[in-house]
Image (cartoon, rainbow, N blue to C red):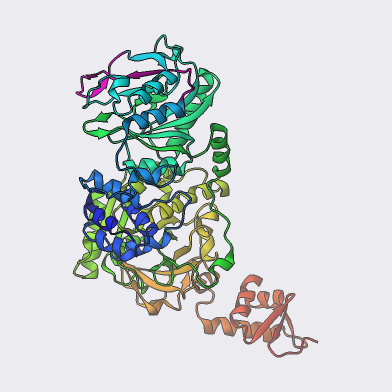
């Protein structure tokens, strides 16, 4: 381990970093052999720090062919004003990135840098165009003056550099030290500096100043860009000179468009004004506002354009690699911690389905309060943490007042109320595939344990009843979980009609994908209650059942909805779900009690029995019921009667 890294780390204020920059620091520390505690202790200086978050992220960091190293921390520290006099032989950030191998030159050689650039990009007889004169734009920025030099070949320039190895100006002339100087990376004909003067279309410029220097470096290497040379602009960007190897300007434009589009797909916003083959780039070796524009890597990534395109095609499916199980025999990966004990883990998905009268929104708001306060939800223990509630249905004032009413009804101190954030999107809802990127950005760096989206019918894309459409729709919840590490919790309504006769997993409206895709599917259905169950006026009775991927099923949970909260109620245990055969039987005006149903069955059997058996149809006709009702009675009293092929016998009677 390198104490210089810890010294550099002290110069970086974690609160000033983006979420990705914070992640990069963790990657770098782990790569350099430091324990997670170093990252965690440093992160505590940020108000966004949450207990256990560093450890959870740390476990997800794995090896890479192009790892983020301690060089990233040094670069961040320098961007925060850190300076250090490096001893001879120590590696700098520039040395880390170089493809020429490790090493460090005590004295930087501007002439050598420019000579390397010319040797890499040009043939000896190529004319090289460059600009050392600068003017200020209307915005006050230094920009290259029109024209410039282009009458000398690469061989002539290299000969001059060799003649004056200590004086770059002797070869290229004086430049404005505040502005720097520029050079064209494609060869010209020596007669001008327009696209028509370009004689070879070998290279394109990639530049992005929307990310930190460390992020730019990491992205370009991760994308395996075929970079002939990578140059520091002396400012906030890197200039990657990428091999496009085009035959003519038409192919050049096609390949540059393809290059820029692939970068955009990977989250890199490039400056598309750089797409011309005659574009100027930063010249290595000169100073700009006291900082050298210098080469920091050569021969990086794929060796040529065709190799890069083949590499892209091989990685286009964006699928994880195949793993061998034996690797984990004695070192299994850690399971994510539970968010709702016995129901849902961190980073997993949960669906709550129910009818429109169930108070689903209130139930999800209660879950948000439980998570924020660390109190049980419907008897299930939860992990305390921050939660984002995405409200798509009710107006802002109603949403906020519902939360406050729940707090009042629960009569708790509200010590964790600041753990709940609300994003009110009524009237602003857009399809989920367009909403998710915005949602992920809103959640970045906030330390949420869960996001609750209520309800999803507002953001559904495709046909609700089409399995393929809904599979693609549900994949968006996977994206939320993967990119944020949070649990995604959402709700959906029941299909039309009575639901009591269906299994809980089949009650949600639309394709069965809805219920089978999430890791936890919870369903609530209304109960038919009797007078003995003592449900007060205005309240309704409900039962929650679950289908779980990670845990054993739990016993059904009975509760009543007493506005604005749901209250556990064990007296409902004997109630039946609305629409179920049992509930319909209980409502029948012909038989209202178990005793009466037993008497009717016994009477029908005794009057229709011959030789130890009776026929279902004859029993039904005798007591004035349908054959279906008689069969339900037999099922209810299966400890006394049995039926097979419409023949009824008493239990224990020999069927022969």
* Outermost residue toward the right in this view: 656
Would you say 164 lies left or right of 137 here? Answer: right
Q: Is residue 132 magenta?
A: yes
* Outermost residue toward the front in this view: 163
Seen from the viewer's position, the closer of residues 228 and 396 is 228
Seen from the viewer's position, the closer of residues 99 and 641 is 99
Q: Residue at x 44, y 45 (%)?
A: 101
- The reply to whether residue 358 is in sight is no
Q: Residue at x 22, y 20 (%)?
A: 137
Q: Quadrant of the N terminus?
A: bottom left
Q: Is residue 526 magenta?
A: no
* Residue 384 quadrant: bottom left
- The reply to whether residue 285 is in sight is yes
Magenta stretch?
Answer: 122-146
Q: Position of residue 500 (x, y in %)?
A: 51, 66
- Residue 524, relative to residue 203: is it above or below? below
Q: Quadrant of the C terminus?
A: bottom right
- Residue 65, relative to residue 242: is it above or below? below
Q: Position of residue 129 (x, y in %)?
A: 38, 17
Q: Position of residue 302 (x, y in %)?
A: 52, 38
Q: Position of residue 566 (x, y in %)?
A: 33, 68
* Outermost residue toward the top in this view: 191
Seen from the viewer's position, the closer of residues 396 and 68 is 68
């Amino acid at each position: 381990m390198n104490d210089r890294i810890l010294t550099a780390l002290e110069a970086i204020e974690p609160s000033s970093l983006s979420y990705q920059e914070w992640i990069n620091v963790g990657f770098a520390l782990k790569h350099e052999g430091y324990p997670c505690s170093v990252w965690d202790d440093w992160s505590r200086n940020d108000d966004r720090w949450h207990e256990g978050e560093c450890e959870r992220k740390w476990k997800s960091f794995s090896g890479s062919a192009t790892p983020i190293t301690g060089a990233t921390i040094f670069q961040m520290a320098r961007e925060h004003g850190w300076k250090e006099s490096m001893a001879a032989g120590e590696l700098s950030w520039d040395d880390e990135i170089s493809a020429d191998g490790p090493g460090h030159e005590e004295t930087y050689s501007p002439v050598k840098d420019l000579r390397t650039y010319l040797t890499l990009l040009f043939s000896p007889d190529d004319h090289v165009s460059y600009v050392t004169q600068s003017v200020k734009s209307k915005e006050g920025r230094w920009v290259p003056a029109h024209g410039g030099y282009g009458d000398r070949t690469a061989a002539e320039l290299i000969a001059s550099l060799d003649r004056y190895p200590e004086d770059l100006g002797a070869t290229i002339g004086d430049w404005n030290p505040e502005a720097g100087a520029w050079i064209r990376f494609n060869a010209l004909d020596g007669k001008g500096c327009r696209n028509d003067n370009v004689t070879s279309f070998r290279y394109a410029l990639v530049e992005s100043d929307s990310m930190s220097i460390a992020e730019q470096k990491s992205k370009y290497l991760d994308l395996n860009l075929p970079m002939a040379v990578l140059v520091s602009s002396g400012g906030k960007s890197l200039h990657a000179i990428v091999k496009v190897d085009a035959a003519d300007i038409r192919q050049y434009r096609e390949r540059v468009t393809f290059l820029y589009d692939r970068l955009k797909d990977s989250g890199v916003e490039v400056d598309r004004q750089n797409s011309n083959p005659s574009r100027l780039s930063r010249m290595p070796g000169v100073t700009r506002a006291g900082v050298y524009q210098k080469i920091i890597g050569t021969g990086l990534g794929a060796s040529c354009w065709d190799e890069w395109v083949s590499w892209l095609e091989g990685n286009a499916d964006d699928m994880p690699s195949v793993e061998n199980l034996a690797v984990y025999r004695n070192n299994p990966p850690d399971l994510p911690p539970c968010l709702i004990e016995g129901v849902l883990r961190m980073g997993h998905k949960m669906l709550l389905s129910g009818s429109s009268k169930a108070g689903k929104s209130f139930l999800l708001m209660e879950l948000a309060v439980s998570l924020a306060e660390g109190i049980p939800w419907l008897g299930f223990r939860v992990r305390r943490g921050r939660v984002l509630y995405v409200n798509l249905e009710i107006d802002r004032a109603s949403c906020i007042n519902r939360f406050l009413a729940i707090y009042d009804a629960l009569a708790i101190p509200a010590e964790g109320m600041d753990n709940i954030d609300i994003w009110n999107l009524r009237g602003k809802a857009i399809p989920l595939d367009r909403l998710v990127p915005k949602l992920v950005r809103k959640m970045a760096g906030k330390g949420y344990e869960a996001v609750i989206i209520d309800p999803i019918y507002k953001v559904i894309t495709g046909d609700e009843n089409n399995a393929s459409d809904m599979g693609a729709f549900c994949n968006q919840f996977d994206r939320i979980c993967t990119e944020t590490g949070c649990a995604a919790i959402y709700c959906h309504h029941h299909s039309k009609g009575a639901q009591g006769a269906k299994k809980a997993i089949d009650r949600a409206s639309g394709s069965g994908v809805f219920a089978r895709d999430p890791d936890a599917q919870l369903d609530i259905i209304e109960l038919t209650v009797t007078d003995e169950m003592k449900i007060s006026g205005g309240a309704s009775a409900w039962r929650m059942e679950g289908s779980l991927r990670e845990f054993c099923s739990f016993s059904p949970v009975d509760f009543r909805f007493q506005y604005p909260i749901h209250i556990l109620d064990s007296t409902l245990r004997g109630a039946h779900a609305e629409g179920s055969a049992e509930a319909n039987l209980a409502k029948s005006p012909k038989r209202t009690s178990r005793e009466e149903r037993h008497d009717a069955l016994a009477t029908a059997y005794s009057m229709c029995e011959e030789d130890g058996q009776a026929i279902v149809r004859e029993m039904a006709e005798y007591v004035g019921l349908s054959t279906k009702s008689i069969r339900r009675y037999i099922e209810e009293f299966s400890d006394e009667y049995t039926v097979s092929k419409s023949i009824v016998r008493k239990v224990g009677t020999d069927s022969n």
